[in-house]
Image (spheres, rainbow, N blue to C red):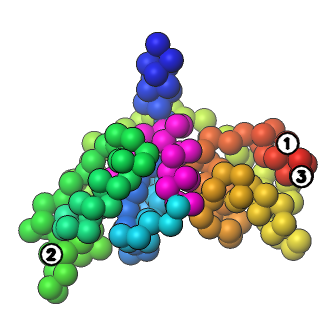
Amino acid sequence: MESTKINELKSQRRYAYVVEGMTDEEKLKRIGCLFVIKTGGRYIRPEIIDFLKLIHQERELVLVLDPDGPGRDIKAHIERQVGPCLHADADINEAKAKGKVGIAQMQIEPLKKLLRSFITHDLYVDENLTLEEDDLFDLGLSGPGSKEKRMRLVNKYHIPYTSSKSVEDALLMLCISKEQIIKDIQND
């Protein structure tokens, strides 16, 4: 029963997309994917796996990985550690360019076609995001002297990035409320 409620809640939220590298992340964001996490390639740091586990409790993960051996290895590793995920498996012929294979090599149109059903869901889901535009600044999590407070959240939620924008994106992915953030930064 509890798992049914969790899955129902997840279906009312945007997807989080998992990619290998920075170019993949930039491409997905350019075509409309709001929440994108990069693994850094084959050797995924433990804090990224921990972060993915937390995100997966709140929203579905869509694995958008390179259609090659390392991409398949990353997919298997993530699913072993995090649990079942959704897949967007690129056609290897559409992901080849200049002797390389990967999401980064795909043209925009085939990538849009690959992700169309996921992006459509994201466009029409009525998710109320947990933070407002100025909340991080108001909470002292951006601007001068903010790093110490941000690091409390980074450590608590296994956020693999420390810039204020990256932390804000992570908190949105995790559905952390402003009230919870206040508690987190006040507790030592």
Distance between the alpha carbons at the discs numbered 2 and 3: 50 Å
From the image, tell me which residue sits under label 3. Answer: 188
Q: Amino acid at mark 2?
A: Lys
- Residue 85: x and y in percent read 35, 43
Which is nearer the N-term, disc 2 or disc 1?
A: 2
Q: Amino acid at mark 1?
A: Lys
From the image, tell me which residue sits under label 1. Answer: 183
User: Mark 1: which secondary structure?
Assistant: helix
Quarter residue 68 falls in: bottom left
Front label number (3 vs 1): 3
Which is nearer the N-term, disc 2 or disc 3?
A: 2
Which is nearer the N-term, disc 3 or disc 1?
A: 1
Residue located 19% across and 81% down the image: 100
Q: Give neighbour class at mark 1: few <14, some 14-19, many 20+ (Cα, 10 Å).
A: few
Residue stretch rendered in magenta on the structure = 47-64
From the image, tell me which residue sits under label 2. Answer: 96
Judged left or right of residue 176, residue 105 is left
Judged left or right of residue 114, residue 94 is left
Residue 48 visible in rendering:
yes
- Residue 9: x and y in percent read 50, 26
Q: Based on the picture, tell me whether residue 120 belongs to the magenta stretch.
A: no
Q: Main secondary structure of the magenta part?
A: helix
Q: Give neighbour class at mark 3: few <14, some 14-19, many 20+ (Cα, 10 Å).
A: few
Quarter residue 180 falls in: top right
User: Mark 3: which secondary structure?
Assistant: loop
